[in-house]
Amino acid sequence: MSEKGRSPNLPTITFAQEDATGIIPGHDDPMVITIILANTNLHRTLVDQGSSADILFKSAFDKLGLQDKELRAYPNSLFGLGDTPIQPLGYISLHTTFGKGTRSRTLNIDYIIVNVSSAYNALIGRTTLNQLVAVVSTPHLCMKFPTPERNATTKGDQRLARRCYKKIGDAQEKTTNIGATLKGDLKGPLIQFLKDNADLFAWKATDMPDIDPKLMCHKLVIYPGSRPVQQKRRKLGPERSQVVEEQSIGRWRMCTDYTDLNKACPKDIYPLPNIDTLVDASFRYKYFSFMDAYSGYNQILMYLPDQEKTSFLTPKANYCYIVMPFGLKNTGATYQRLMNKVFADHIGKLMEVYVDDMLVKIKSEELLLSDLTKVFNTIRKHGMRHNPAKCTFAVEAGEFLGFMLTKRGIEANPDKFQAILHMKSLTCVKEVQQLNRRLAALSKFLAGSAIRSLPFYATLRKG
């Protein structure tokens, strides 16, 4: 047989039932893998056997720290990524590793850089798959290719694939808040900025990466001689039991009674910021951006040896927290430590932070995007995520730690006044105490508030 007609020397690659272990059967999910690109793990990489090109999306290009000046011109347009042809920004050659350890292959791939919105970071086409001599089985969500050792296997991430797919389907439902009076020449760029940084928001718990435990984790300090306490399992109604089993976040918030554990832990004396000081340093700015972390405490991991101390009972099994839960003593101090570390370069300058409440203070229209960019870059660097429903960007006034901040100054929160105005006539000591607390919260806005409150305190002394 002539050289031209000879069959290529290809390895034998087969797939077995065990290759589909952990995969939900009957799926229609794409093959999404993790590769090593520019010495970085690049998640959300789509293996697309129908594409003739290898594509790196501009958002991922920027996050990898690559520079536009490294790009070389790409003369042709791309088809298939949208309704119209797309002109690439250029292309770049990057070393890309598939697999791990000795069962891996590294190729030099020419990536075409495109600036379009995508749920994926990169797309690997059939040109690279042929060079890799890779065989993809979508039912198994598995890719195999030969290495000097033997055939390597790269598994697709089904959960990540579904997250990418869902992002395309319900993108219209994912919103956050911006100032209603924002000028048109600022509104458009701000909206685009938030879209470009949509990965820094979390719409559900699975959207959150964990904070690096080397940066911060929650450790329990237990009094010497303390003994474990086993509480009795409590009976829950059907609705609450379902919440515990599904661990859903909705009408009910799952809480665990850590009274006994908290008694065994000394108080962490790490100081929280003074609220009046933060508020006084935050008025007379042009714009304010209010941000809130998504289930902030749950973004911090528990110290591994302490995880079993957070154990709790459910009707079907016993569990423990691997993240810092609500209701545990000293969690506020741990979270404030994290925020002080993460935003050390910004606090007191363009930011104020109290536990998981963040305020970005912007002096002028020209600094709006640049200041937000600095903050978002810091958030991305440390793997934090925002709650989009509780974030508001570029407003001229807003509530922070119970006070109204405006460009004129600090004003009392109208809700606190209404709470006093709608109080019924006082009938017991408890209601007098409640009134005193509400007056104390408004004391800086009430002339002679101490003198006016004396009759109420006198009543408490008599009672």
Image (tube, helix red, strand yellow):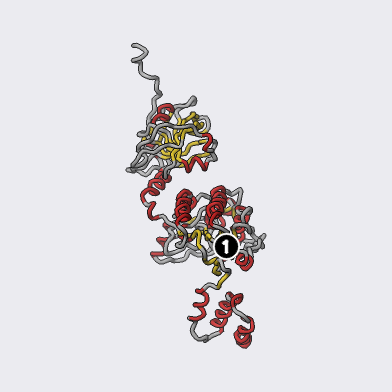
Percent of width and height locating residue 151: 44, 28
**Relative to 342, does residue 278 appear above or below in the rendering?**
below
Residue pictured at 46% horizontal, 57% vertical? 388
Depth check: give the residue in front, 63 or 17: 63
Task: Determine whether the residue tagged by mark 1 lies in a helix, strand or loop.
Answer: loop
- The C terminus lies in which quarter of the figure? bottom right
Q: Nearer the viewer, residue 300 or 163?
A: 163
Q: Nearer the viewer, residue 223 or 7?
A: 7
Residue 442 visible in rendering: yes
Q: Residue furthest top?
A: 1
Q: Which residue is mark 1?
A: 285
Which quadrant of the rendered structure holds the N terminus? top left
Which residue is rendered at x = 44% and y = 55% of the image?
203
Image coordinates for residue 187, horizontal then vertical, percent = 46, 56
153 lies above or below 10? below
The disc labelled 1 sits on which kind of residue? Tyr
Q: Name the foreground residue: 241 vs 362.
A: 362
Relative to residue 423, is residue 204 depicted above or below? above
Query: Which residue is depicted at the point 36% across and 49% down?
Result: 169
